Image (cartoon, rainbow, N blue to C red):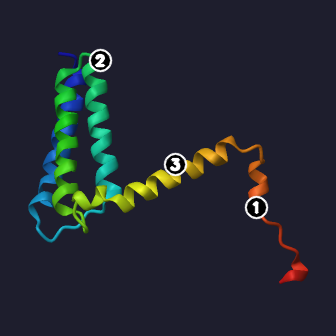
């Protein structure tokens, strides 16, 4: 085992220890804007460590990602529920993607989106 593998595994293990009280506290509220990115980072790091042959680090990172997913599921203010995948939310996401793609394909300069204001208009 490489010593770096051990260090990353210990770091992930400590993060799990420090996150456990949040999961156990029924009054804790962690926004999805915090827990979902942290969960994703844990899983991506786990995959990355695995491809580098750092099996212990990968296991620790996946365990930390799993801990964050449990926090998102049980400790977010609105709860991670099927409502997150509701039709309105998906439609809004698709609309945002279409708007973003249309802006990317546009020949307009990004400067054109700003409006100049004359001081006489104020």
60 over 81 or under it: above or below: above
Front of the two marks 3 and 1: 3
32 over 100 or under it: above or below: below
Q: Position of residue 27 (x, y in %)?
A: 15, 71
Taking the spot 22% from the left edge, 35% from the top edge, the residue there is: 61
Considering only order in the chain, which callout, 2 or 3, is on the residue closer to the N terminus? 2
Q: Secondary structure at mark 2?
A: loop
Out of 19 and 76, give the one closest to the viewer: 76
Q: Position of residue 105 (x, y in %)?
A: 68, 41
Query: Which corner quadrant of the image does residue 120 belong to?
Result: bottom right
How far apart marks 3 and 1 lie (CA) works out to 21 Å
Which residue is the site of mark 3?
A: 97
Q: In this rendering, would 11 be left or right of 113? A: left
Q: Secondary structure at mark 1?
A: loop
Taking the spot 44% from the left edge, 54% from the top edge, the residue there is: 93
User: In the rendered image, which quarter contains the N terminus?
Assistant: top left
How far apart marks 1 and 2 lie (CA) works out to 46 Å
Which residue is the site of mark 2?
A: 52
**Structural crowding at the residue carrying mark 1, measured as other residues with C-alpha within 10 Å and reported as few (<14), some (14–19) or many (≥20):** few
Taking the spot 25% from the left edge, 67% from the top edge, the residue there is: 78
Q: Position of residue 57 (x, y in %)?
A: 21, 28
**Are the residues tagged 1 and 2 within 8 Å (C-beta)?**
no
User: In the rendered image, which quarter contains the C terminus?
Assistant: bottom right
How far apart marks 3 and 2 lie (CA) works out to 34 Å
Which residue is the site of mark 1?
A: 114
Out of 62 and 2, give the one closest to the viewer: 62
Front of the two marks 3 and 2: 3
Q: Secondary structure at mark 3?
A: helix
Point out the residue furthest to the left here.
24
Query: Which corner quadrant of the image does residue 4 belong to?
Result: top left
């Amino acid at each position: 085992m490489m010593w770096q593998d051990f260090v990353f595994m210990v770091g992930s293990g400590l993060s799990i220890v420090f996150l456990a009280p949040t999961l156990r506290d029924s009054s804790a509220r962690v926004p999805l804007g915090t827990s979902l990115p942290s969960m994703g980072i844990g899983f991506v790091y786990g995959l990355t460590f695995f491809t580098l042959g750092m099996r212990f680090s990968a296991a620790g990172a996946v365990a930390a990602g799993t801990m964050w997913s449990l926090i998102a599921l049980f400790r977010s203010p609105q709860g991670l529920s099927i409502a997150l995948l509701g039709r309105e939310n998906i439609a809004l996401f698709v609309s945002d993607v279409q708007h973003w793609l249309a802006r990317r394909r546009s020949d307009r300069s990004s400067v054109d989106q700003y409006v100049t204001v004359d001081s006489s208009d104020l």
